[in-house]
Image (spheres, helix red, strand yellow):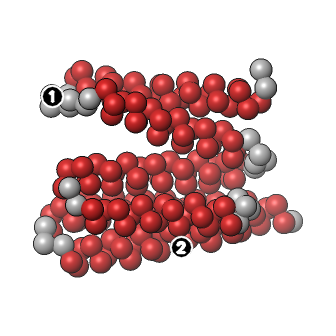
Amino acid sequence: MTDSSKAISRAALVALGLLMVPLVASQVVEGWNWPPRAFVLVYVLFFGTALAYQLIAKKMGSWTHRAAVGLALVTGFVLGWSNMVHMSEAENPAYLVYFGVLVMGGVGAWIARLQARGTSEALFAMAVVLAIMTVVQLLLSNQAEVAARQAIGHAVCAAAFATSGLLFRRSGLAGSK
């Protein structure tokens, strides 16, 4: 088996394992009625995230770099997932703006060619933009309780992006010595 087919197999198995959580929850939690296409979409998202980690992290030597990649991908997944849920529940296309944060980070990492310093700067920018967007949402929302709950989640994501940026920065500094 080649390295790339091993990475694909590992990502497929990780995604299948993660898919068991919503599958079991749909049997146990009352009112959780996902159609089959939702499970397919979730599997594809899990698989894509796991595969991205496998392909990026295998080229990284240090644990800080791997941790930074993992934290950034998981946080991006959580932010994207939570905003998909908010969009589907509120039917508010304004939540699409949060996907801009993910696009900004992806483009920044691509421009930096996943080098530690450039990627850390992209993650810091993501954290700052997400924090600003959260404050604006709090100020403009007419549903204070909902906005406050979302703000907490977005603040946690901003902190996780900043932490990932710090890990990338540390990895880059360690590699330059």
Left or right of residue 172: residue 119: left
Answer few, some or many: residues within 10 Å of disc 1's Cα (few below 14, many 20 plus, some between 14 and 19). Answer: few
Give the residue type that dot 2 points to.
Ala
Residue 80, percent from left and from top: 40, 53
Rounded to the nearest angstrom, the CA distance separating label 1 from label 2 is 40 Å
The number of numbered discs placed on residues in the rendered structure image is: 2
Residue in the image at 33% along x and 71% along y: 134
Q: Are the two marked residues, 1 and 2, in contact with CB atoms closer than 8 angstroms?
A: no
Tag 2 secondary structure: helix
Is residue 5 found left or right of 16 in the rendered image?
right
Residue on which the image places disc 2: 125
Secondary structure beneath label 1: loop
| Residue highlighted by disc 1 | 30
| Quarter that holds the N terminus | top right
Question: Looking at the image, which is closer to me, 66 or 82?
Answer: 82
In the rendered structure, which amino acid carries the disc numbered 1?
Glu
Q: Residue 94 carries which label?
A: none
Whether residue 49 appears in this view of the structure is yes
Q: Residue at x 40, y 55 (%)?
A: 79
Q: In which quarter of the image is residue 142?
A: bottom left
Q: As drawn, is 86 to the left or to the right of 171?
A: left
